[in-house]
Amino acid sequence: MNKHPTVELAQQLIQRESVTPNDKGCQQLIADRLASCGFKIEHFQYDEVSNLWATHGTQAPVFVFAGHTDVVPPGPEQEWKHPPFSAVVDNGIVYGRGAADMKGSVAAMAHALELFVAEHPNHGGTIALLLTSDEEGPAVNGIRKIMEHFKESGIKLDYCLLGEPSSTEILGDTIKVGRRGSLSGWLTIRGKEGHIAYPHLADNPIHPLGKVITKLTEKVWDQGNQFFPPTSFQISNLVAGEGTGNVIPGQAKVNFNFRYSPELDEQAIIAQTHQILDGLNINYDLEWQAFGRPFITENGKLIDVTQQVIKSFTGLDTELSTSGGTSDGRFIAPTGTQVVELGPINASIHKANEHVSLQDLIKLTEIYLQISEKMLC
């Protein structure tokens, strides 16, 4: 298994320290391989972000594999069983940052494309690979920018399979057919700094913070629907004080995030949050940032084919899910593209000792190949 082309390519990709937004030559490595088997290669560089668009064929429908070559930082190396960019194979498992998220998928996609055009040189439609190097970062100059370019150029994607690590316990047990929206707020409650022994001369912003947290966490924002769980509210950071025990701070800051279903939109969440805060009679500032709206592919050929192929390889009736964080699918789905996410087991992603089994990489390559055949042949 160590000599399988997908495994060897995955190791080569993992060994490149492509911490977002750096690509470190990953896309060029893949581009060279695909160009040698007839793919048209286009590179799009926006600031520090590298993007690759490789196509074979010129007709509709357009079926695209999509993913990213950037990874999150590895963290302290001493927490790793093997160095995070060594791509060591140990007992049938390859370890390294990006092994599951998502250089393993990218390698499987690239090799599946090589096999597909070798076996079906005159296939129908267009098969393509779309890669970026900022999915783990701000996601401004990657797929978002490419989709703007496609819109201006009249390029329409009909089907997109993202290689995000969707599986939970067994390869193929879960595929993502949508994602929740993500909206973050940065709340500053303003008070008046003073000596802690003279509270009448100060205004402690921490005290009303308890009421704010209670109101926002206890509110039922919606009930979700058949595809999405209810909207969730979570606090990620809370800062107040200067680290000394005798000063009432002048302000308290809270960072929070909504993961929301299509039962709400950004404007409704923002309006209801301000209504709660205004009702507490506090002096505050609140800044918002939207990271993506909810999307879903409810049905269609791509879901049907993906389920059929997974069933044939694993015997599993795969679960259709909208859980998890955001993905680049949020920029692709709004154009009318059917989007499905299928990739390795996600238990180790963004952790020390991230890994993927060689057997899963090989099986994933065959699954991607067969999906391609059913979509375009």
Image: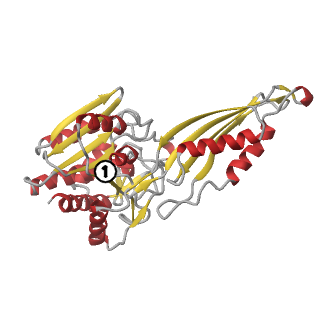
The picture places residue 263, in percent across and down from the top left corner, at 53, 54
Q: Nearer the viewer, residue 5 or 189?
A: 189
21 shown above or below 375:
above
Residue 278 percent across, percent down from the top left? 73, 38
Q: Is residue 116 left or right of residue 242?
A: left
> In which quarter of the view is residue 4 placed?
bottom left
User: What residue is shown at x 68% (from left), y 53% (from top)?
Assistant: 219
Residue 97 spot, x, y in % from top left: 40, 45
Q: Is residue 86 above or below residue 89?
A: above
Position of the N terminus, as image quadrant, is: bottom left
Q: Is residue 253 left or right of residue 89?
A: right
What is the tally of numbered marks visible in this picture?
Answer: 1
Place residue 270 in its image quadrant: top right
Quadrant of residue 268 in the image?
top right
Q: What kind of residue is marked 1? A: Thr
Residue found at x 36% / y 37% = 144
In this rendered view, identify the residue nearer to me: 244 or 367: 367
Q: Disc 1 designates what residue?
A: 337
Q: Which residue is nearer to you in this view: 272 or 57?
A: 272
Residue drawn 12% across the image and 52% down it: 117
